[in-house]
Structure formats: C-alpha cells, structure tokens
Image (spheres, rainbow, N blue to C red):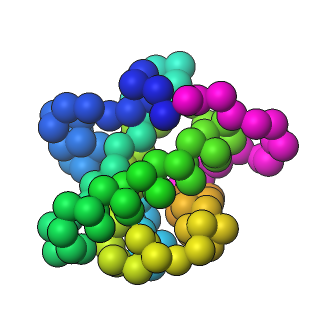
C-alpha cells in the first residue's frame, strides 16, 4: 500500500480514535473517522499481547494486503484503523482474512458497491 494511503503519525491514529466510531468484527476491530481528503488512509495496529514481533508483523502484513486488495472499493474521505485482536490472524486462510476485513468495512459503511477491478496500490 502506497505511503499516501497510510496513516503514519501517532497524532493521526489518536484523531481517528478520538473523533471516529468503532466497529467490532471478532478478530478485528475497526475505527473510522472522516478526513476531508479525496482519498482514504489506513493504519494497522497489532498489540504486543498478540505475540512476538514475527507474529505481529505477519498479522500486519496480511491485514494490509487484504485491505490493499479492497482499497478500490473503499469510499474516499476516511481514515481507518484496523486493530488486530487475535493471534489467529497470522494463521487463518487468507480468503477468510479477506472476508473478515470486508465484513468490518461493510459494517462501518465505508465500502462501496463491488467493482471487480484490480488494484495497483503497490
């Protein structure tokens, strides 16, 4: 996912938590807040309680990839933070993870009607 599409500073994460809403999707939690921009930005949080650095990094990479594939369907103008809540995210099948991310985005109402286009978000 390109740098322009990511939340990077602690202040950005704090603003989403302070001003946004939260949705629970089981193993994943989502915070979202409007950002007054022409694009949506995403951030990823993997708490230390999920395991060591290797496990947390794997979870972060997998969730980021699932979001990257769905990014063209995300409504512009949102800052979204995905918070991993289970170490099982490192091991579940990727299609299940994609479905979990999609479900969280749908609950939050930030997912457009499906376009079957491919992403080049790199």
* Left or right of 116, for residue 28: left
Q: Which residue does the image show at 29% across and 43% down from the upper left?
A: 16
Q: Which residue does the image show at 38% across and 33% down from the upper left?
A: 6
Q: Which residue does the image show at 55% across and 29% down from the upper left?
A: 122
Secondary structure mostly seen in magenta is loop
Q: Is 109 colored magenta in this rendering?
A: yes
User: Residue 78: percent from the left, percent from the top?
Assistant: 47, 36
User: Residue 39: percent from the left, percent from the top?
Assistant: 52, 25
Q: Which residue does the image show at 18% across and 43% down from the upper left?
A: 14
Is residue 19 among what the camera can see?
Answer: no
* Left or right of 73, for residue 45: left
User: Residue 32: percent from the left, percent from the top?
Assistant: 40, 48
Magenta-highlighted residues: 108-122
* Left or right of 64, for residue 95: right
Compared with residue 82, is residue 122 higher up or lower down, i.e. above or below?
above
- Name the foreground residue: 13 vs 59: 59
Quarter of image, res 100: bottom right
Q: Which residue lies furthest to the front in this view?
A: 54
- Name the foreground residue: 27 vs 11: 27
Quarter of image, res 7: top left
User: Residue 15: percent from the left, percent from the top?
Assistant: 23, 39
Compared with residue 100, is residue 5 higher up or lower down, i.e. above or below?
above
């Amino acid at each position: 996912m390109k740098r322009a599409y990511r939340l990077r500073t602690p202040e950005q994460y704090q603003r989403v938590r302070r001003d946004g809403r939260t949705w629970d999707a089981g193993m994943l939690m989502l915070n979202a807040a409007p950002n007054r921009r022409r694009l949506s930005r995403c951030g990823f949080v993997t708490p230390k309680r999920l395991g060591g650095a290797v496990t947390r990094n794997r979870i972060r990479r997998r969730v980021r990839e699932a979001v990257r594939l769905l990014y063209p369907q995300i409504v512009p103008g949102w800052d979204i933070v995905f918070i991993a809540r289970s170490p099982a995210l490192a091991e579940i099948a990727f299609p299940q993870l994609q479905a979990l991310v999609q479900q969280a985005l749908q609950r939050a109402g930030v997912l457009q009607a499906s376009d079957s286009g491919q992403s080049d978000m790199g």
